[in-house]
Structures are given as structure tokens and as C-alpha cells.
Amino acid sequence: MRPLRLAGLVLTGLGLFSMAVGIVGVLTEEDDAPLDAAATSETTTSVAAEVTTTSAAPSTTTTEAPETPQEFYALWNEAAAGDDVDTLIARLHPGVLEFYGEEQCRGHVGRFAASIRIEFVSVGEPKDYDYGSERENRPYVVEDALPVDVVVHRGDDGGTEQVAHLARVDGQLRWFTDCGDVLDG
């Protein structure tokens, strides 16, 4: 056999071996956190990258844990206290912006955010949330939304218990609010 052909066969064999090791590693990896669509696509991308590699060195894949409601509300409170309306708008659910438009939501959030703090209490199981029917009978169902029990504090009051909803979009939790008048459409 020619040396180049032999080298090609050896490299192909090493590549197939690396691919098998990577696939077995992914299949046996334990993760108690539920996978959302974004996490699944990230994992698929990582596996595809491992499959096409020809390196004999084992590769490692790290997957960040999904953002928790507690983490989301810590970020929300920090942005609100700092009057960071851009961050709060960026974390609104796209359905909110579809209903009210960014300009109206920016004004609404800018008027109230700095005056409140949201205290996380507990989170329920994911379920469908019909955000739209609460607004002008325009159904807008968000699948796998998280019902979150919170206490909304305004100034020094004792707070008001409420059920808020969060939903994952592109791997991040997004929030819902009523920004005012629903846009035509």
C-alpha cells in the first residue's frame, strides 16, 4: 500500500473513532435540566462540530444551565433600579411588542420600572399561557410559559402578590406586561 493511502486510511479511522467517542459521550451525558428548543439546537450544533473533526484528542462540550426565574428577576430588578429601559425592553416577550409596539412599551416601562421591585416567590410547571385573550379578545397562546408567583413592591409598601408569566425565547426568559392600547392588526 502506498504511504499516502495508508496515512489517509489511518486518519479516516481516527476520525471515525473520535466521532464514535463524541456521540457516546453526548448520549451518556446526564443533565437534569429540561431542554428547551435553544438548548437542543446548541447541543445539535456541538455534536455536528464534533462529528466533523478529525482530531484524535477528545473534545468537551459545556452546556449552560437555563436561566432561572430567580436570575431573571435579579436582572430585572437591577435594570429597573438603574433605569435601564433598554434591557427591560430587550427582555420583553416578542408578543408584547407585537401587541403594543416598541415605542408604546418603552414609554410605559420607562414610567413605572424604577419605582418597583419584583420579589420572586415560586414558579409553577410550564403550561400554555393565552396572553392575547386578556387583551381585546385577540388570542396569542404562548406554549410552555412559566407561571411565577411574585410580590410587586412599590416604594415601601408591603407589596402585592401577583402571578406573572415568563417564557423562553432564544434561550432567555422574557416577561409580559400590558403597555396600553393594543395596535390594530
Image: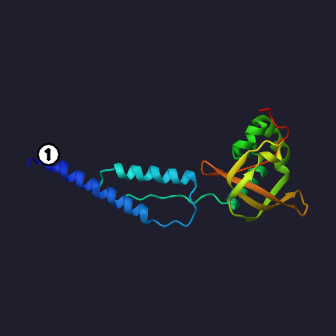
**In the rendered view of the protein, which quadrant contains the C terminus?**
top right
Three-letter residue code for mark 1: Leu
Instruction: Give 91 or 87, whichever is nearer the viewer.
Output: 91
Is residue 143 positioned above or below 160 on the image?
above
Is residue 107 positioned above or below 20 on the image?
above
Is residue 32 positioned above or below 40 on the image?
below
Q: Position of residue 4 (x, y in %)?
A: 14, 45
Q: Position of residue 55 (x, y in %)?
A: 30, 53
Quarter occupied by residue 59: bottom left
Is 90 placed left or right of 179 in the picture? left
Is 97 placed left or right of 31 in the picture? right
Instruction: Give 182 or 160, whichever is nearer the viewer.
Output: 182
Is residue 36 positioned above or below 121 on the image?
above
The number of numbered badges drawn on the structure is 1
> Is residue 78 in view from this perspective?
no
Q: Position of residue 33 (x, y in %)?
A: 57, 64
Q: Position of residue 86 (x, y in %)?
A: 72, 42
Is 15 placed left or right of 174 in the picture? left
Q: Residue at x 34, y 48 (%)?
A: 52
> Is residue 163 in view from this perspective?
yes
Q: Residue at x 42, y 53 (%)?
A: 47
Q: Residue at x 46, y 52 (%)?
A: 44
Quarter occupied by residue 160: bottom right
* Residue beneath disc 1: 4
Instruction: Give 119 or 50, whichever is nearer the viewer.
Output: 50
Outermost residue on the left side: it is: 1
Is 27 placed left or right of 119 in the picture? left
Outermost residue on the top side: it is: 184
Crowd class of label 1 (few under 14; some 14 to 19; many from 20; radius 10 Å):
few
Q: Secondary structure at mark 1?
A: helix
